[in-house]
Amino acid sequence: MTWSDRRAGYKVTDRKERGAASRWGTHPMRARWKVFVACTAVAMIQSMDVAMITVALPSIGDRFSAELADLQWVVAATALALVSILPTGGAFGDLYGRRKVLLVGYGFLLVGALVGWMAQSMAVLIPARLALGVGMALGFPNSLALMALSFSPEVRGRAVAVWTVMAAAMFAISPIAGGALVAGFGFNSVFIPLFLMAAVGMIGTVLWMPPDRPIRERSLDLSGILLGSGALTLLSYGLIEGGRGGFGRFRIVSVVAIGLILSAWFVRHESRFAHPMLDFRFVRSQSIRSILMVTFVLYAATNAVIFLMTIYLQALRGLSPWETGLVMSVFSVAMLAGAPIGAYMQDRVGFRMPVGIMLPVLVVAALLLSLAGPGTRILGYVSVGLALIGMLNGVFFVVSSATSVTTAPDGQSAAAAASLPAARQLSGVFGIALSGVLATVVTRARIRTLLPGTEEKALQISEVSFGVTPDGIDQAVRAASVDASYFGYSVVMGVIALAALVVAWLVLNLLRSKPSATHLSGM
């Protein structure tokens, strides 16, 4: 007799394992909700982290006299670790036990939050951010699997609903909470809630989580992990550091070339490996192709906007961290409102219409944000643009998740579902990297145009902080820096609109094409 839980991926085939399974299934309700708390902590941390650290970026830049490239690494380090390990985070649980891997994940989260809390230099802060990404990647998939095991099918839906609401609520309030912490206690304080939440999760896992047995039905794609993470890191390094000092240097050209070679090697390896980290076969589906195209543009644009907007609001518009968090919460609230709209549209009209309108609406939002200048009202272009992008994220998250599973070819729904979070993180990394590079290059060129003959001085100006200039710079150079920073911000938003317009045309043509007979029923 076999007991199985498809969501968790468990197969229990002997008496000892059936006993463990029965212990999971017969928990008193109070014990089950204790397990729920232990599993949910990692999701809360993931919801809080990006919003809080993004609001803190201008303060980090001031504290360490950091350039935009340094601030990009603060965000990109976590995202790189997350996207590299997340697809195989569940595989580690299969091989070594989900409870053990979840505890290791919480360990990384505790260390990352503690080191970030005490960091007094960028050289310490960035490794702390990297550790947080590793902890999230190990903890998130295994916490979901363990939560599925701890609840019977009759109450599992309620548990998932509560988990979703809690994560969404945490995401909505995090910009305001993070801004208040930064304003009152400095940027290091944003790591305190992460540390406390990780401590609750680890203690709860030790005290309340029953042990589970590993299963060894799949091999670990270690080569895929190394090739994928290596390619992502090298390409991100080339983009970010190339924007800092120029792309013509031999070191940058070499790093990018090696990154491209590793990327091609990774694709070749994944197409031949029995249990790949990412299964590329499902991309043959027209629906999946369109969703992945929209995913890359939408999430790259979203991360670019969030990254640059907090710097724009504080350095150029003079808002406090708390006020910046309040403005950024418009995005979070709009995203929450978009989720039920996405569910309604998916049920009523299918995926084609929602996916088709995503990028045209993004074009409008990016154009509105590009118009936000020194004299415009924050509650005008900025708030409307952020609300539109937040709404798009909420709608698309629901539609893309549902469609990727239901329309993927037979036997590839799991690959599609696993690849969507990886695609979101990947696009986010490149959105942050590309927007920072473009902002740096355009701003620096604008300063040189406004102040001819000041090339060396232009290089010394921290134009990455949008208007923040070193002490001792004369007023003419300071004014030119502010003007150039506004210009760089507007150009980045305009490029986002142009890229969204081009890809929107491609997606609409793809959606209008006749689906193949194999996938007709799912389309």
Image: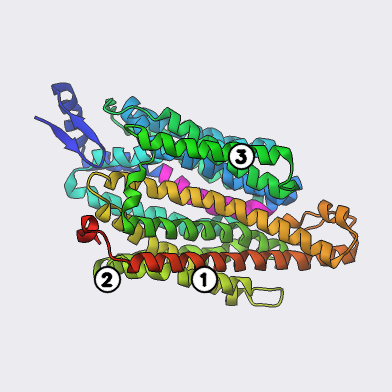
Q: Is disc 3 surrounded by few (<14), some (14 to 19) or many (20+) residues within 10 Å?
A: some
Numbered label attached to residue 257: 3
**In the figure, 67 relative to 400: above or below?**
above
The reply to whether dot 3 and dot 2 touch (C-beta < 8 Å) is: no
**In the figure, 223 relative to 476: above or below?**
above
Q: Nearer the viewer, residue 461 or 504?
A: 504
Numbered label attached to residue 349: 2
Q: Is residue 515 left or right of residue 477?
A: left
Q: Nearer the viewer, residue 71 or 158?
A: 71
Tell me the element at label 1: helix
Task: Check disc 1 and give the amino acid type.
Answer: Val
Cα separation, mark 1 vs mark 3, equals 32 Å
Cα separation, mark 1 vs mark 2, equals 23 Å
Colouring mode (rainbow / by chain / secondary structure / one colour): rainbow
Which sits earlier in the primary sequence, circle 3 or circle 2? 3
The x, y position of residue 90, in whole percent, is 35, 36
Specify start and end residues of the magenta stretch as a single range.
Answer: 42-58
Task: Check disc 2 and give the amino acid type.
Answer: Val
Q: Residue at x 74, y 51 (%)?
A: 62
The reply to whether dot 1 and dot 3 touch (C-beta < 8 Å) is: no
